[in-house]
Amino acid sequence: MNNADLLQRSLAAVWHPCTQMKQHAGGELPMIPIARGQGAWLYDFDGRRYLDGISSWWVNLFGHANPRINAALRAQLDELEHVILAGFTHQPVVELSERLSALTGGTLGHCFYASDGASATEIALKMSFHSWRNRGRETKQNFLCLEGSYHGETIGALAVTDVAIFKDAYAPLVRSAATVPTPDARKAEPGETPADVARHAAAALEKHLAAHHETIAAFIVEPLIQCASGMAMYDPEYLRLARALCDRYEVHLICDEIAVGCGRTGTFFAHEQAGIKPDFLCLSKGISGGYLPLSIVLTTDTVYEAFYDDTTVRGFLHSHSYTGNALACRAALATLDIFAEDEVLEQNIARSQKLAATLAPLANHPRVRNLRQRGMIIAFDVVSDDPRFSRHFYRAVLEREVLTRPIGNTVYLMPPYIVNDDEIAHLGHAVAGALEATTCAPA
């Protein structure tokens, strides 16, 4: 097998996600056949390697072919690969539910399983709506989200997504939610702090809830970072104020931690930094270590009890064939074991500091704006008149043996938690080199 052979076969048979296929077929956007992964690196069939600077779409936490997760999956293969979760249960799903609940201090004691992040969003929205209905609050049918929000690309998830490129083509199919201003710290006026921006945005949220709370079931947010809208980072003060407002106006708070959970922001759950608890917590991506599709919605006793009844139709009648898959749950348990045994969050403090120091010189680049970081996510915006900047940067950084995918003019890194000092330096050098290769005169 070689790169060229697999590439042609893939172009003929595979419809790749989030992609204009003609750009791949015409060579404008290179497609990279991957033969294997090891640690933070991916290797193609011709021996070239790429440092996985975005954790393979934000899912890989502890490197490719991680021996401990591999061993856990091998052991599980000899016991149980999958069983229907309707009317049956198994040890990995029970243990995972118990351990996740414990990480919330027992506040979120009930776990509902699916396979991907968008499905988790759908579940949380449906569960919120249905729980209000079961409690006799039928008017609470609508949802609220942040300007620039992204929560998935299925029809229900698109309702609370405010990124035009994903949503506009399907607008006739979507029952859109209302939006309120984002607390994105980049909106700060001279003299303002990120906390000031958060308070301004919370004031707008309060005004909207005061007027519409009787018809709103839930408010959904990505805590601390709105990833798909350019890694928009904001102060935890917004979450504190939003939690209080949702309590006052009887609106559920959904924390979508599909991308920002599992240690990405510095704490295991991003909402911990605000000292709050949501009514629903959505997890996916990193929870299985990047190995298998798995998503989970955690919720409270209050929500669970709204469905607890003798009447079947008052139950939460939602299912996926692979709900609570034993292999995926075992991968997640191995992932939690690594967090517990290796003091990952503590070690990530040092990694994030080295990442910051490596990219710090870019703050002085004439075309760089808003260099920002929270935990193991670092990003900056590039001033460029090139409408294809993201594609050109993507190619330039690939040539320097790094995988990253800019979001518009926002360049970001979200590497696995096992990157060492040399690999962090390599990331920094590649990004700096690609930036010089794709920008011209000072802005």
Image (cartoon, rainbow, N blue to C red):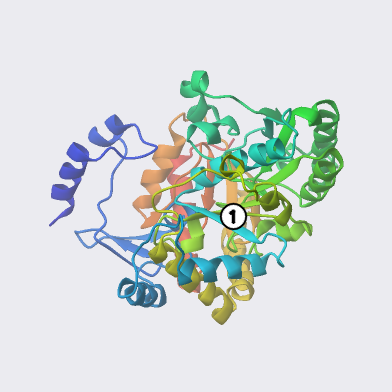
Q: Is residue 83 above or below residue 242?
A: below
Residue holding disc 1: 378
Q: Is residue 53 above or below residue 139?
A: below
Q: Position of residue 129 (x, y in %)?
A: 65, 36
Q: Which residue type carries mark 1?
A: Ile
Residue 199 sits in quarter: top right
Q: Secondary structure at mark 1?
A: strand
Q: How many marks?
A: 1
Q: Is residue 288 above or below residue 280?
A: below
- Which quadrant does the C terminus fall into? top right
- Which quadrant does the N terminus fall into? bottom left
Residue 149 sits in quarter: top right
Q: Residues within 10 Å of mark 1 (few under 14, many from 20)?
A: many
Q: Position of residue 153 (x, y in %)?
A: 48, 36
In the current view of this chain or complex, which residue is farthest to the front?
A: 310
Q: Position of residue 436 (x, y in %)?
A: 47, 46
Residue at the (40%, 45%) spot, across then down: 394
